Structures are given as structure tokens and as C-alpha cells.
Image (tube, helix red, strand yellow):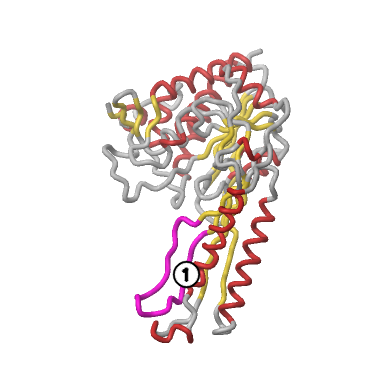
């Protein structure tokens, strides 16, 4: 079954209270790949909330056409529960989809579409819950926070969090709805990443000793990362690190580009060096160690051709989500779901950024992270309904 946003939503008056599925269908229809704008989606959400008497606020990125949105329902006081999600999705380029990625398609007990799992399904549930909270006149306030650029390093959430301060009353407990199969995840790794560009010197490869091959110089940095991973894997993990899989900090390069021809020493080599750092370790320490190695390799390059060099820039910097002792957000998630097991993940989210800003934070959302970013991405209908049930129970709590 294809749920057409035109048929299902666009002919529906904005004052109608849409179901979570209708909301997800509309959100999916916006192709908010991280490299593109998300403003049409944010405009639609703002209009939808306004049609129900809810004022929303925005953080407007000064350097690119992207907005974040946040809104408040209930008493104008501090202590809100905050439902946080991101609006960007990963590209579909080169993926063999069996149906239109930007139209929600139901088959075999699943909703297919880019972002159904990661994480417009949760965004839809959050919007639905905010509207319901507004009409229910809840005693405890509820907020939503919809950011951008999560998929490229969680860079959109920090300025949004800062923008929220003083505009809406400060919330206290943040539920980040990344797909966790509705389990309460109380910790995740932090991360730091560096764009790296080595600039060598081109000569005929038969005279390679007179040139500087940027790719081969870059290989020294990648081999250093391999050594880091081997050493960290061999070391005994700390008590905190042992909660994660893998139980150690990792260094990773996923894409590399450079070179002109097989018989020319490569002038350019570009890649990103990313670290996923276990809580309790200083992510900046790993950044410092990498930059030290960069300078070492650069010195070797310049000993042959002085004008060669290596450029680096920080591409993301995400704090870990530290497990909280008696954390309020965790207690809310556990009391609603009944989940009392310990769950940690190795990917990063804005939960650590909210935590750094003074909020209690937990990850709890519908869907399985294994389906995120995949061709034919989907969320199980049962998982989406479990998320809806979670929100109904949250509303009951907010009503006191």
C-alpha cells in the first residue's frame, strides 16, 4: 500500500489532527538529504503546529539553507520533557530501492521509506504528541526539538540547544528518539573527526623519489589508525568501556580519493579520519594524537619537497552520552517501557550534547538501527505502534 502525501494529507485541512502515520507520510515526502535544504519540511511543521495554536521557534543556520525548530506545549514553566529528533536523512544514491524512497509504502508488516526508521517515524510521533499535549492541557510541559545535519556529525543540534535557552523554559529530561527498538539506551560513544587533505608533488612514477605521493603519505596516517585499533583492542577495557561493543575507542577511514594516473605520483589525497571514543576517555586526546602524527608525516613530505603540506579541519565533535546515576530521562523511559536492562550503543547522537547543556538524556525510539541507511529502509509496523503506545503513556504522565 502506497500512502500518497497528496492524497492522504495535502487535501486535508491543516486544522485536522493528523495521525502519526499521516504525519510520517508527510515528513517522508520531503527529501531532506543532509546535503540539501530542510526548510520546506520545517515550514510545513511550523504551519501545522500554528494551525493548532502552537507557536514554534527556529534556529536559522547563517551559512546554509537549513533551519531547526523547537516548540513548547503546556504550562509556561521549566521542567519539560523534550522529544528530540533530526530532520535530515542519508542519500539514496546508488541504492536499489524497490519503491519510491520518499513515499511511505506498507508491505509485509513494514513501512518502507527513507527516514521511516532514522528517524522521521519518531519525529512524526513527537509532533503528534505535542499537539495532543496542547489539547489535553497537560500539567507538565512538553517540548519538541527538530534539528538538522545529525547524519554528518550532529552539527545542527548544538546551536539549536543554545537557541532554545531563554526562548522557551528550560526542559529537564530529553528523550532522543533514535531507533533503539524502544529500549532505554543510557550511554553512547563520543566522537571527533577530521577532514584531511594531503598535497604532494607530481612526478613520473619512475622518478618517485623526487616527488611526494600524497596517497602513499596518507597511507602512513591510515596505518597509524590501524595500529591504534590493534593496540586498543588488545588493551583491557575499563569498566565503562566494557559496556560497549566494541569495548574500545576506534579510528576509521571509510572513503579515500586522490591521484591522477597510475604512472604519476599523486598530488592530492583526501579522506576523513574519525574516532568513536568510549565514555571516560578524552576525545580531544585522540584528536591531539592524530594531529601530532599528521605533523610528523608532513615533516617527512617537506624533507623531499618543502612546498608540500597537509591540511586538516574538524568535521564533527560529539560528546559521549555518559550513563547517569538515577537520571530522570532514563527513569521516564524505563517506567513507560518496563525495560530494566542495560543498553549502550557505539553511534553518536545529540543526547550527549543535551547532557552537556545541563539536561538529563536518554535514547529511546522505535525501529532497529540495523535498518538505518539501508536501501529499502523500513520500520516495523509493530515498532511504530510501540512508539505510539509510548507516547500515549507519556501523555498520561504529563497530565498528572
Left or right placement of residue 148 versus residue 20 in this view: right
Assign the N terminus to one quadrant of the image: top left
Q: Residue at point 61% right, 77% down? A: 299
Q: Is residue 110 magenta?
A: no
Asked if residue 154 is positioned above or below residue 13 in the image, the reply reads below
Tell whether 84 sits left or right of 370.
Answer: right
| Most foreground residue, 230 or 251 | 230
Residue 221's quadrant in the figure? bottom right
Q: Is residue 261 above or below residue 97?
A: below
Look at the magenta stretch and give its main secondary structure: loop
At a point 69% along the width and 25% down the height, the residue shown is 328
- Give coordinates of residue 254: x percent, y percent: 46, 55
Would residue 242 be found to the left or right of residue 13 on screen? Answer: right
- The quarter holding residue 303 reads bottom right
* Magenta residues, start to end: 253-272
User: What percent of the width, then of the height, locates residue 204?
Assistant: 39, 85
Return the residue nearer the eye: 130 or 236.
236
Residue 316 percent coordinates (x, y): 58, 53
Q: Is residue 270 magenta?
A: yes
Amino acid at each position: 500500500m502506497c500512502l500518497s502525501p497528496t492524497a492522504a494529507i495535502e487535501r486535508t485541512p491543516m486544522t485536522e489532527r493528523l495521525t502519526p502515520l499521516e504525519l510520517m507520510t508527510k515528513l517522508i515526502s520531503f527529501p531532506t538529504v543532509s546535503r540539501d535544504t530542510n526548510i520546506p519540511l520545517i515550514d510545513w511543521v511550523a504551519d501545522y503546529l500554528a494551525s493548532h495554536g502552537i507557536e514554534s521557534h527556529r534556529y536559522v543556520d547563517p551559512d546554509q539553507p537549513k533551519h531547526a525548530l523547537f516548540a513548547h506545549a503546556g504550562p509556561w514553566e521549566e521542567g519539560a520533557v523534550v522529544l528530540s529528533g533530526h530532520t535530515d536523512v542519508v542519500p539514496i544514491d546508488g541504492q536499489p530501492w524497490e519503491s519510491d524512497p520518499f513515499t511511505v509504502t506498507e508491505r509485509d508488516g513494514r513501512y518502507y521509506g527513507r527516514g521511516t526508521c532514522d528517524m522521521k517515524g519518531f519525529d512524526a510521533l513527537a509532533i503528534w504528541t505535542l499537539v495532543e499535549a496542547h489539547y489535553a492541557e497537560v500539567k507538565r510541559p512538553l517540548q519538541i526539538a527538530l534539528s538538522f545535519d545529525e547524519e554528518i556529525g550532529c552539527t545542527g543540534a548544538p546551536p539549536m540547544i543554545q537557541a532554545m535557552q531563554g526562548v522557551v523554559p528550560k526542559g529537564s529530561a530529553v528523550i532522543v528518539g533514535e531507533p533503539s527498538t524502544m529500549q532505554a539506551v543510557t550511554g553512547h560513544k563520543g566522537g571527533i573527526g577530521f577532514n584531511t587533505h594531503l598535497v604532494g608533488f607530481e612526478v613520473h612514477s619512475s622518478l618517485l623519489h623526487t616527488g611526494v605521493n600524497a596517497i602513499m603519505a596518507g597511507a602512513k596516517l591510515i596505518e597509524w589508525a590501524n595500529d591504534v585499533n590493534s593496540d586498543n583492542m588488545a588493551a583491557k577495557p575499563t569498566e565503562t568501556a566494557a559496556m560497549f561493543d566494541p569495548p574500545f575507542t576506534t579510528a576509521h577511514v571509510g572513503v579515500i580519493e586522490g591521484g591522477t594516473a597510475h604512472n604519476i605520483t599523486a598530488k592530492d589525497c583526501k579522506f576523513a579520519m574519525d574516532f568513536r571514543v568510549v565514555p571516560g576517555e578524552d576525545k580531544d586526546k585522540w584528536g591531539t594524537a592524530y594531529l601530532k602524527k599528521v605533523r610528523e608525516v608532513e615533516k617527512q613530505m617537506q624533507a623531499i619537497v618543502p612546498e608540500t603540506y597537509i591540511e586538516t579541519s574538524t568535521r564533527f565533535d560529539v560528546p559521549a552520552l555518559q550513563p547517569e546515576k538515577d537520571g530522570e530521562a532514563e527513569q521516564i523511559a524505563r517506567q513507560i517501557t518496563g525495560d530494566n536492562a542495560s543498553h549502550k550503543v557505539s553511534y553518536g547522537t545529540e543526547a550527549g550534547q543535551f547532557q552537556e547543556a545541563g539536561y538529563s538524556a536518554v535514547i529511546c525510539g522505535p525501529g532497529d538501527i540495523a535498518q538505518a541507511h539501508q536501501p529499502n529502509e523500513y520500520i516495523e509496523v509493530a515498532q511504530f505502534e510501540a512508539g505510539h503506545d509510548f507516547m500515549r503513556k507519556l501523555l498520561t504522565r504529563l497530565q498528572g
